[in-house]
Amino acid sequence: MPTEINVRVLLKSRPTGFPVEDDFEVVESPIPQPQQGEILLESMWLSLDPYMRGRMNDAKSYAPSVDIGEPMVGGAVAKVVESRSPLFNPGDIVEGRFGWQSYAISNGIAVRKVDESLAPVQTAVGVLGMPGLTAYFGFLDVCDPTPGDTVVVSAASGAVGQIVGQIAKIMGCKVIGTVGSEPKAKFIVEELGFDYAINYKTSDVAQSLDNLCPEGIDVYFDNVGGIVTDAVMDRINIGARIAICGQISQYNLKTPDLAPRNLGLLTRSQAKMEGFLVFAYESRYDEGIARMAAWIKEGKLKYKEDVVIGLKNAPKTFIGMLNGENFGKTLIKVAE
Amino acid sequence: MPTEINVRVLLKSRPTGFPVEDDFEVVESPIPQPQQGEILLESMWLSLDPYMRGRMNDAKSYAPSVDIGEPMVGGAVAKVVESRSPLFNPGDIVEGRFGWQSYAISNGIAVRKVDESLAPVQTAVGVLGMPGLTAYFGFLDVCDPTPGDTVVVSAASGAVGQIVGQIAKIMGCKVIGTVGSEPKAKFIVEELGFDYAINYKTSDVAQSLDNLCPEGIDVYFDNVGGIVTDAVMDRINIGARIAICGQISQYNLKTPDLAPRNLGLLTRSQAKMEGFLVFAYESRYDEGIARMAAWIKEGKLKYKEDVVIGLKNAPKTFIGMLNGENFGKTLIKVAE
């Protein structure tokens, strides 16, 4: 039995606009005790993802809000330290939605054993977990790519975007990524093999797209929304496919942003725009994990992590990620 | 050989904003002579459709612009009055893109013989022609309806909308139509069998949708765009399908309209939005015509025409239609 205390990050108040650290409260509690059928988990890696911003709101969404005073939700990789369930043994490494806390109790539902032979265990909340599977199914299924397609990915060095772009290259596509810094631009081209990068903070995105893809755009995988989307929409080809994965540019606005009404472009281009959630593909997660694990072993798929140590740093790291300060998949290293 | 003159309506200038009658020029010319392989056609019915507004612009679109000084494009039902083609005989009734003119020459390409046994011949540019086929394929294929779905159709008494709503009822859906007048509202409910109508000019569309479809919206067939679309988007269900057929509210704006950025709603709802053109379904036109002709004979599918006599009235009738002054499918009766 561990003797330490349980560090938990609770939602203290609902932000308007950008969250601030004071919207969170870090508390220390005794380590909980598992009941019959339950397991006690020690968190190793906590994933920080943009969707969590939505959970801080009290608005209708695809998942319930976090209640004030409750721990923030989130996927984590954890070690079973005590088991009163026949399904798990102490020492098992598992992945599940254990929240922003160093210890958690689970009844084992929606808890997945991590295959440690595939890749470092934290990939179970990264490339071989929710963000990677989002990229895999969102690109291959929603975007229905064909070799030779010109593909634009926004937030291209992020947890999802970096995987989308590399799968697009594996598929034989031409890939342009939009990013928010020069190091990210250099990274996606030189390390990940994207054809081109556009720094949306320093470039005219529309002009850059004209220069880099004069043949138009066949696929757009969108994590960002806003002006990048406007520029892409003006350049879609006949039969274009647009996957709306995220809209991080819109999550922290105090007043709604306005856009040109451009749905007529979908008609002119006979194009399809689809929003998706990775959960729709749950029955095929094993396929996605096996395929991506093989690509990793073959050196065809790389992943970049942005690791911050210590759960107490989760609030400021999360806020930084919403500002685009992360460089790669954002992870909190909770414990060894 | 007819002895009359050929009345033609030419594009005189490209409108900015709403077209005015002075953007058109009505001219009289000699009747043209067919060459070997050609046919001479006397126009009977000219179809006026919102897409023609796009052809008046000099902007990139899915079809070429009309050149200044050339006759406006448009589908028409015509009679073959002279044939130098082995494929057609004098007296044949045909449908094709013969333009805004009382006589036309054709080489027979993309000219379809009209089956006079199905319905009155002018339906070949109405319910059994481009607008009806747009409704048939756009609703059944793009919207993929299921019995019990709640369906919203904009411009619901128009050439396309009236057919969409009735096919939705045949499919066992709940159907709400948006229209711009009380007579139209009464008509689509009492004559066409829609469940409800919303007059967008006199009602709060959002509030009306809340009242009429508290269970949310599964399918939206959009001919209009703008604020109707905004209100629908806020109420789409998981797995909603949205067909972007037209955006008539946007065709005559001098400055682009702005909309709330709401693509995140597609993600939350795992919804799909697709723009389409009926031409993509050309290989299946016979299916659509046969199915709709049978529904007409069975009394399951009605169609309302708004007929104006005389080609010289085409410009002002067209402008009126863009203003929503038509009530049903707009047709110019060119000749008997």
Image (spheres, coloured by chain):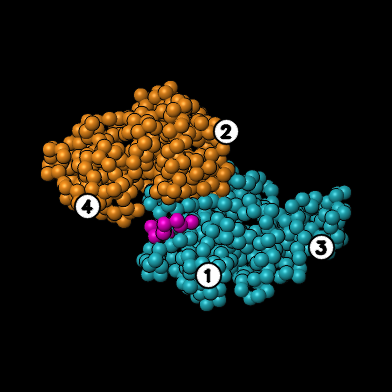
Chain colours: A cyan, B orange
Q: Nearer the viewer, residue B282 or A11?
A: B282
Circle 4 sits on which residue? B36
Q: Disc 2 is attached to a residue of which chain?
A: B
Q: Secondary structure at mark 3?
A: loop
Marks 2, 4: nearer the viewer: 4
- Whether label 1 touches label 3, CB < 8 Å: no
Residue B23 is situated, as x and y percent measured from the top left of the image, at 18, 44
Q: Secondary structure at mark 2?
A: loop
Circle 3 sits on which residue? A92
Circle 2 sits on which residue? B148
Q: Any magenta on residue A231?
A: yes
Q: Does residue B202 show up?
A: no
Circle 1 sits on which residue? A172
Q: What residue span does the magenta drawing correspond to?
A: A230-241
Q: CA distance from mark 1 to mark 3?
A: 39 Å
Q: Secondary structure at mark 4?
A: loop
Q: Any magenta on residue B293?
A: no
Residue at the spot x=29%, y=48% of the render?
Answer: B86
* Quadrant of the frame with the C terminus of chain B: top left
Q: CA distance from mark 1 to mark 2?
A: 42 Å
Q: Residues within 10 Å of mark 3 (few under 14, many from 20)?
A: some
Q: CA distance from mark 2 to mark 3?
A: 47 Å
Disc 3 residue type? Answer: Asp
Disc 4 residue type? Answer: Gln
Residue B120 is situated, as x and y percent measured from the top left of the image, at 34, 30
